[in-house]
Amino acid sequence: MSTTLTSKGQVTIPKQIRDALNLAPGCSVDFAVNREGDVVIRKVGARPGREPDRFEAARGKADVRWRTDELMALLSDAD
């Protein structure tokens, strides 16, 4: 699988790689070159061979947008 370098030095990470690393828009990645000269890309915060913890896996998934006053009213009405 290959991709083309743009005039700005950018490349698109192929979907198969994005899926394998569980990368989504906004994710940070780290690049390194190993002893053999291969480029290694790693999701920032990920540890090799380890699944993300339950909080990391859920981060950014909520679709409920609470306004502060609505949340405070809900919490203060709890008896």
Image (cartoon, helix red, strand yellow):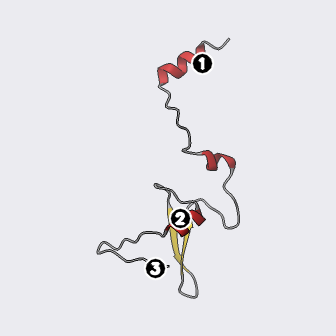
Q: Which residue does the image show at 40% across and 72% down from the upper left?
A: 11
Give the Cα distance between marks 2 and 1: 40 Å
What is the tally of numbered marks visible in this picture?
3
Q: Amino acid at mark 2?
A: Arg
Q: Amino acid at mark 1?
A: Leu
| Residue 58 percent across, percent down from the top left | 62, 45
| Residue 74 percent across, percent down from the top left | 57, 17
Task: Nearest to the eye among marks 2 and 1: give it.
Answer: 2
Q: Vertically, is 62 above or below 9? A: above
Label 3 sits on a secondary structure element that is loop
Residue underneath mark 3? 2
Q: Are marks 3 and 1 in contact (CB under 8 Å)?
A: no
Horizontally, residue 55 falls left or right of residue 62, namely right
Q: Which residue does the image show at 50% across and 66% down from the upper left?
A: 15
- How many neighbours does mark 3 have within 10 angstroms: few (below 14), some (14-19), or many (20 or more)? few
Give the Cα distance between marks 3 and 1: 53 Å
Query: Where, by quadrant of the figure, is residue 48 drawn?
Result: bottom right
Q: Which residue does the image show at 50% across and 28% down from the upper left?
A: 66
Q: Amino acid at mark 3?
A: Ser
| Residue 75 percent across, percent down from the top left | 60, 18
Task: Nearest to the eye among marks 3 and 1: give it.
Answer: 3
Q: Which mark is residue 75?
A: 1
Q: Which mark is residue 18?
A: 2
- In the picture as drawn, the residue positioned furthest to the bottom comes out as 36
- How many neighbours does mark 1 have within 10 angstroms: few (below 14), some (14-19), or many (20 or more)? few
Horizontally, residue 42 falls left or right of residue 11, namely right
Circle nearer the N terminus (2, 3): 3
Of 8 and 24, the residue lying toward us: 24
